[in-house]
Image (cartoon, rainbow, N blue to C red):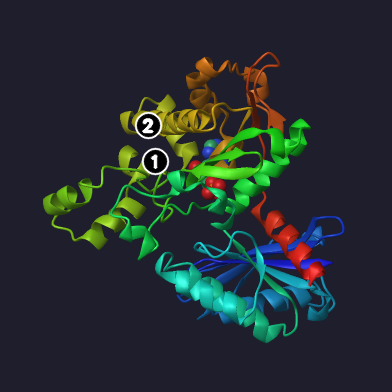
Amino acid sequence: MKVLVINCGSSSLKFQLMDMETESVEAKGLCERIGSEGSRIVYTPVKKPEFGKITIESPMPTHKEAIQIVIDCLTNAEHGVVGSLSEIDAVGHRVVHGGEKYVDSVLIDDSVIAAVQECAEFSPLHNPANIIGINVCRELMPGVPEVAVFDTAFHQTMPRKAFIYGLPMKAYTEYGIRRYGFHGTSHKFIARQTAQFIGRPAEELKIISCHLGNGASICAINGGKSVDTSMGLTPLAGLVMGTRSGDIDPAILEFYGRKEGLDVSQVTEVLNKKSGVFGISGGKSDFRDLEEGFYAGDPGCVDAIEIFCYNVAKTVGAYAAAMNGVDVITFTAGIGENSAFVRGKVCEYFGYLGIKIDEAANKERGEHVISTPDSKVTVCVIPTDEELMIARDTKALAEAQ
Ligand code: AMP
């Protein structure tokens, strides 16, 4: 079975075509600057490595043209990887917000599209783009099963005490304001892969999954189920991130707005785009640059890294308490997978958990354990693969229909 995975962002579209017999990637790519000047597709026909990376500049006023170009690339006589569109058996869409309605991935029909539309008020940049992607695929590939895989679904197992905010109850009952959590596809993948990697059933493990990328969140996973997570109603909550503030005193909104002459939506923009390690360091959000600055003694970079690592360690501690213990801590995503420096710094806080880090192992790459054999808690690095998780769910639902 061949599954096309589509991830529509507000002005971008990531895609991957997977052969599910071998779970291998046949082609992948990215359409950028959709809806503005200079739009282009970067396409890699993995199955035909002789072509390397192909960049094609082409107007993409909407996601529709973008998907058409993706299809043209995949079916191209030279660098294409399928003879015709009919070889694609199913399409899996990443959908950001599924609200409370979706506790798992679903086959898409009109009612699913309506529900995704309803959730758009929680995710105004992403859900509408996701719907366009779904509709265009329906039009171009009629009859091919499409599946929605929600970022929020994995967290629907959280207990009320973890998802209800300390607000008047009508905030939840009338407006749906609650913790939803995000990165669910990644945390779900990590829960399963971690269990498989250490050779124990997920049902008997307490795992803390640290997805540390430009957006970052931590998830407490007890017996394979999410029981708490750091993002909230939106992906702005929780850890200090690349450009997002994470948790702050809510009174800051009014106070900072008054000082800067900004209204609430302008302050929210600052919290989303100009805060986090970017704001703290004075303009750097990539951890490679921040590490370099740290070693050069740049005070902004030192602050940013210390604050980020402290935030991660503090949240892991909260989740170890919430689950009354932890068996495995897993690092994943851009920073979690690649920065031995950040992992080492975070783990300095974990002496009380009986964790010791093997410095040499911490420097290795790929799927590996970084704690010493006598550590009371296993700490490992597992590269996340959201596309594979989406493709697996899509295959399972398409086959079951
Ligand atoms: P993601 O959002 O998961 O793609 O992660 C992107 C972030 O990972 C980048 O902004 C960098 O901060 C970080 N990153 C990627 N590679 C490295 C690396 N080799 N060392 C440190 N940080 C890295």
Q: Which badge, 2 or 1, comes first in the chain's sequence?
A: 1
Q: Residues within 10 Å of mark 2 (few under 14, many from 20)?
A: some
Rendered-image quarter of ligand 1: top right
- Residue position marked by numbered label 2 in the rendering: 307
Eyeballing the image, is 332 above or below 164?
A: above
Is residue 34 visible from the viewing direction of this image?
Answer: no
The quarter of the picture where the N terminus appears is: bottom right
The quarter of the picture where the C terminus appears is: bottom right
Q: Amino acid at mark 2?
A: Ile
Q: Amino acid at mark 1?
A: Val
Answer with left or right where residue 99 lies relative to residue 261: right
Task: Depth check: give the residue in front, 52 or 380.
Answer: 380
Answer with left or right where residue 367 lies relative to residue 275: right
Q: Residue 180: x percent and y percent? A: 47, 54
Real-space Cα separation, disc 2 to disc 1, in angstroms: 8 Å
Proximity of marks 2 and 1: CB atoms separated by less than 8 Å = yes
- Residue position marked by numbered label 1 in the rendering: 240
Residue at point 71% right, 16% down?
373
Q: Residue 225: x percent and y percent? A: 62, 45
Q: Residue 65: x percent and y percent? A: 59, 81
Eyeballing the image, is 385 above or below 29?
A: above
**SS category of the residue bearing label 2:** helix
Residue at point 64% right, 79% down?
109
Task: Depth check: give the residue in front, 196 or 305.
Answer: 196
Q: Residue 80: x percent and y percent? A: 79, 72
Answer with left or right where residue 320 lies relative to residue 20: left
Is residue 191 visible from the viewing direction of this image?
Answer: yes
**SS category of the residue bearing label 1:** loop
